[in-house]
Image (cartoon, coloured by chain):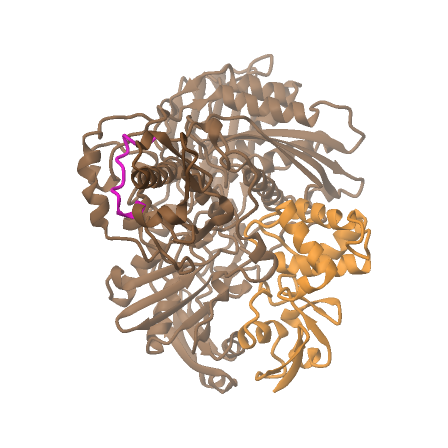
Chain colours: A brown, B orange
Amino acid sequence: MSARRDSTTSAPSHVRSDSILLANVSRRGFLAGVSAFGGLVLAVGFPAALRAADPPKYGRDGMDDGWVDDPLVFVAIGEDGTVTIVCHRSEMGQGVRTGMPMIVADELEADWKRVRVAQAPGDQKRFGNQDTDGSRSTRHFFEPMRRCGAAARTMLEAAAAARWGVPVGDVEAQNHEVVHRASGRRLGYGALAKDAAKLPVPSRDTVKLKDPSRFRYIGKGNLKLLDAPDIVSGKAQYGIDTRLPGMLYAVVARPPVYGGKVAKYDAAEALKVPGVVKVVEIESSPPPAEFNPLGGVAVIARNTWAAIKGRQALKLEWNDGPNREYDSAAFKGTLEQSARKPGKVVRNEGDFDGAMAGAARRLEAEYYIPHLAHVTMEPPAATVRIANGKCEAWGCIQSPQAARDRIAKRLGMQPADVKVNVTLLGGGFGRKSKPDFMIEAAVLSKAMGGAPVKVTWTREDDLHNSYYHTVSVEHLEAGVDAQGKPVAWLHRTVAPTIISTFNPEAKNEAPFELGMTAINIPFVIPNLRIENPDATAHTRIGWFRSVSNIPHAFAVQSFVAELAAAAGRDPKDFLLELIGPARRIDPRTLGDTWNHGEDPDRYPLDTGRMRRVVETAAREAGWGKALPKGRGQGVAVAYTFVTYVAAVVEVAVNDKGELAIPRVDVAVDCGAQVNPERVRAQLQGACVMGVSLATKEEISYKAGRVEQDNYNAYEITRIDAAPREIRVHLLPGDFNAPLGGVGEPGVPPIAPALCNAIFAATGKRIRRLPIRDQLKA
Amino acid sequence: MVTLNVNGKAQQVDAAPDTPLLWALRDVLGLTGTKFGCGMALCGACTVHLDGQPTRACITPISAAAQRKVTTIEAIGADRVGKAVQTAWIEVGVPQCGYCQAGQIMSATALLKQNPKPTDADIDAAMGGNICRCGTYSRIRAAIQRVAGQKGATQ
């Protein structure tokens, strides 16, 4: 925190070197062993980098570069009283630029009307981890940001007490002022900023956090989205909107097959297109793709349209490489074959084979979920310029630190000489965690002598060259007793792993994929085996909002409903019986060593919370109510990103097989909600995305090439087919207890709840997504 | 060189006549509020008004826009209905990432100017061309209904 007049620059100019942070470490160091999460006085050790020898590290401590809670890094107060708070996570619609600064502002007793938000560039050493993914921002940074605001408040109080010559205990910060209780004297934050900035940052053990009953913004839902005024007036700046003097515009023709490269090209016609300046080849990187650009041929022009026309005029020949025969229809058969044979056992309890042999009845089902694409409304776009040995980049990036490191590596520069500015993201959903598109801009700027170059991906580029959600076959078998109660459960999950994008030899799902509702199911079934047969990737596989939970939850929650139907039981009651009584399960006992990176002691799998969201969604939806013909309800639950979400979907299917979704009830237990208004928005949006992927979305391949070019072939749910009403029911939480994720957990229960509702309405069981016209058969 | 009337101002655009209005607005005139989403009139992110009619700028060549009044998101707040729509968007908390919302607001404003009391079916028909990947549809509907229910907002 420092006195500062200019609050408009994008990076906080006041930020001092790391030496300030390190200088405080010795003071903090003696508290290293203290663990006081949950108290009003917090003391939680020192930066993760300094504790490398202390295994194991969970949550924010386990992330690269951990966390920082230094107010000198995150807060600046101008002499006019304007408080500038740095947001170090990327805004992609989840509301983090509102929520994160709100936490600081609340503890700081700042008046939100006088708060400005500055977006941090990629610099994890300074700001702590910046990978905006995994539904982690609030759950990891709630406590550090509270301490950050509280420390700044403490410094302002100390400055006021010193000014008045009174004990600091006699003064109190209140809504952008410090008040001397006895005399009623007041000093505004602007008047105190200079003095406060000269004071040492208080040690964590002395910083008093507010009692949650005194929060003015946290948990209230009383603040409008920070960027909304700019968004509705066209002023908001996304990655695609960057404009620099002398900027050139590029589009790239990339290899249509993963692992392919340019065989030869002829740029003569492209160069004749008015406005085209240059044609540049980008060297291909052989698999694994990692975060590297795919390579190809770039057309650089005076405007985007000229670049697009220039690209159309290129004569290109590709060497397609080893994935040239990838055919998703054939690959479905390959996955099915694997799913019907034993595979790597990843969890095994009791005696599945013996119990199956003795079961009264055996059931089996196979589910197919295709590749998906994020199709963020803003396609990937980035701008880079290089001058005087420094590179500056702008982009819609979820991982600015990775972008910085990778650009530096590709250009042969030091990361310190590369600055990555984070714009707003027109959607992220995991696609923009990969900085390949930013590296392209860097390569092209270098090819143009450092001139600013903006690379824009067209929608076709986005669909043809994404990092796709995996494709999977989920094979389930169960043996049930005479009452239809499951006594044996087998789940074989077969899907190319995200790890293949980094190690082409990887053929099994990683712990973080299996730990997404495949192995960590808490069902009361005595004999249970979960297997993961091999699968080979033939395209770039990547994270997609809620990741492997999509196929796993679809299969598991559909199969539970199938078992309920076979038993003639109510699906909700049957689901609750399978979950069993309320208990806290150590995820490690389920074979889940990952637990979303969180401490299994702080974040056990709590079946009481799981039951509660099911019961809440069912009650609010009027579960079991009389419905006319062609209508039905379905329920599903998923525990993902340490949050519990249940959905009850109500559908109407007419005689023509046309599907409508009049209503969805979603119950959420993510712990306490910092910004409940945005939590609702995220759950509503996730519901629509879940409906969209269940009903319409599929990426398919022929001859190694994605078959979908644009939104006409890769359809997204539009307003007419979206659920007419999405009611979100937030379960109350405790701000002194661990928080759960919000961005992703709303997606996984939707597809199974929808298909379970379709079964209730029509008797037709959907086992292959997307649904498309399967109801019309 | 094509002369465009954009937001009430005559502007010289140095670009080929087949250049889509979208790229002329964004790259030549610097009006980046109008967004690129698909380039094929499939997603509505580029929606502007041509003589008051909602139009996809990504497939409209500047030669076809030359004799007409172009209104973009940057100027829609000067219109009474446009302003009411913008306000409702903020009050209802419609935007998530916000990228598609310029197009949504342009479509919604055109709808409400022509049909001050739209039914659900009217909203579906008018807004069906605008995709929102964040899934803000229920709030878009609520915001349109909010404006429609405000006395004097649309007339």
| Residue A589 placement: quadrant | top left
Q: Is residue B47 left or right of residue A379?
A: right
State the residue at coordinates (47%, 25%). A734
**Measured from the top left, where is residue A760 in percent x and y?**
70, 29
Q: Does A763 lie within the magenta span?
A: no
Range shown magenta: A196-208
Q: Quadrant of the C terminus of chain A?
A: top right
Q: Position of residue A132 (x, y in %)?
A: 41, 47
Is residue A313 in view? Answer: yes
Nearer-the-camera pick, B152 or B35: B152
Residue A338 vertical placement versus A591 (above, below)? below
How far across and down, in percent of the image, does residue A333 sit?
51, 45
Residue found at x 57% / y 22%: A575
Q: Is residue A289 above or below residue A101?
A: below
Q: Residue furthest front?
A: A183
A70 with respect to A265 (left or right): left
Majority SS type along the magenta span: loop
In the image, residue A515 above or below residue A279: above
- Viewer-proximal residue, A191 or A741? A191
Task: Say left or right for A390 vs A437.
Answer: left
Residue B3 sits in quarter:
bottom right
Image spot of residue A17 (x, y percent): 23, 52
Number of on-image labels: 0
Mark yes or no: residue A85 visible: no
